[in-house]
Image (cartoon, coloured by chain):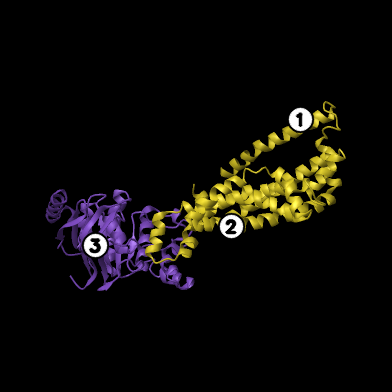
Amino acid sequence: MKKLQNITNKLYPTALLLFLLLVWHMVTETGFVPKFMLPSPIDVIRAFINSFSELMQHAAVSLTEAFGGLAISIVLAFSIALLMDRFEALYKAVHPLLVVTQTIPTVALAPLLVLWLGYDMAPKITLVVLTCFFPMTIALLGGFKSSDTDAMNLMRAMGARKWQIYRYIKLPNALPGFFSGLKISVSYSIVGAVIAEWLGGNSGLGVYMTRVRKSYAFDKMFAVIFLIIILSLLLMKCVGLLERRAMPWRHTEEERN
Amino acid sequence: MGKIKLETQTISKSFAGELIIKDININLGENELVSLLGVSGIGKSTLFNVIAGVLPPETGHVLLNGEDITGQAGKVSYMQQKDLMQPHLTVLDNVALPLFIRGVNKQKARTQALSYFADFGLEGTQKKYPIQLSGGMRQRAALLRTYLFSHEVALFDEPFSALDAITKNAMHKWYLELMGRINMSALFITHDVDEAILLSDRVYIMTGPPGMIAHEIVIDTPRPRGDQFSVSEAFIRYKRQIIKQLSS
């Protein structure tokens, strides 16, 4: 029964997607919208195949930046969240600043970062970090702070040290939130890298995008967009798998319900 | 009563300038089960936190085997109404947690914990997660965790009060039967008069505020106390006496 439901659950969005693709196809093939303004889905697929090796080269660069930034973000998120949870004064001082960093428009910041840090990967990774660390930090901090006081008292009564309370109570309590944050962050990371590349650089999907846009090769432009979507979805899926591996107890919970 | 395991001497504690408990003197003998009975909010849990060493008292001392352990956590074990099983650990790891904290090698801790599973009626649950267990089973696991924490003295803060009446009855029976097999001195907090009479050797009655020990009653019906005890005349007599003292 459950399997059947899974299939129907997937059926609806797939059907809608196919329908939209069909509408798109009809609109362009009939000449309702001229081809130089909107390429047909077939054209996009063709462009994707023809420029595949080029796309992959640029994707490798963008992914390296995204992963680099993500890795730094994770380390940063854990460190900041731990320190903020441990020292109340730090929490009060830093929390509003953290929120402010999220209101800075990244598109405006990117050219400055390029100016300061050059045309290599450094400004891109910095931008990825700036967009990615926040959701994870907040999620982790929320998890630490919402840990059960009674459970921690019991641990203390058992003679637990501070790190043992983190190890057995606070970190596990923060994991579900961390993974939700990570899911948001992986999709941000690729978009962040691409935006940074728009505004200066020699390679990467963003650079490629600007290049094909300037030559009005809209089919290739769409091919890049689709590649970014596919990459983001794949990464989110990976995080989902990782989440299941990291939290087997949630898995049994789901099965039971 | 045998040797005195645990003793409190003139313990007082206030919060925000308000005296919560005053001059508490109680003691607990070896293998004895003593209840602390009082209405909610009288300061029973405060006293327990002081004895457990999580809360420092304003005045007074806590002695374990004659040694001053005031303000020291980890000396006496502690169990609450909430089972406080960690959802991310298997039942076995939850039970072995006090051993992990003490720094016992994980494999050794698990083997030691597992050797008690049959005694505590937990066979076959070791690999499960707490969510997969019933409330009664979780309390059993919590009790084993308490036992592994310290065999000496255990504090119970309304351990069965979150269970439904039928499960609670079964747990009382199981608990009494278990206590016949293992050695553990236990101090019970409860606001359930029946539970206090059924399980205890002695009952302290706390009134207030501020919370003070008003009376001490010895329940001298020998163990094992059969099913009939809770409807016996002696039981009713104790109950009448306690209810009167609680309201005075």
How far apart marks 3 and 2 lie (CA) works out to 49 Å
Q: Nearer the viewer, residue A242 or A220?
A: A220
Task: Please tell me which residue is depicted at 61% across the width and 59% down the height of the picture.
Answer: A75
How far apart marks 1 and 3 lie (CA) works out to 80 Å
Q: As displayed, is residue B231 above or below residue A44?
A: below
- Quarter of the image for residue B138 reads bottom left
Q: Which residue is mark 2?
A: A245
Q: Horizontal placement of A207 versus A15: left or right?
A: right
* Chain ID of residue with mark 2: A
Q: Nearer the viewer, residue A35 or A190?
A: A190
Mark in front: 1 vs 3: 3
Q: Colour of chain B?
A: purple
- Quarter of the image for residue B84 reads bottom left
Task: Please tell me which residue is depicted at 26% across the width and 50% down the height of the picture.
Answer: B41
* Chain ID of residue with mark 3: B
Q: Residues within 10 Å of mark 3 (few under 14, many from 20)?
A: many
Give SS at disc 3: strand
**What residue type is disc 3 on?**
Ile
Give SS at disc 1: helix
Q: Residue A252 location in percent, x, y?
A: 51, 53
Give SS at disc 2: helix
* Image marks 1 and 2: residues in contact by CB distance under 8 Å: no
**What residue type is disc 1 on?**
Val
* Image marks 3 and 2: residues in contact by CB distance under 8 Å: no
Image quarter hosting the N terminus of chain B: bottom left
Q: Horizontal placement of B107 versus A42: left or right?
A: left
Q: Which chain is yellow?
A: A
Q: Residue B202 location in percent, x, y?
A: 18, 62
Q: Which residue is mark 1?
A: A23
Q: Which residue is mark 3?
A: B11
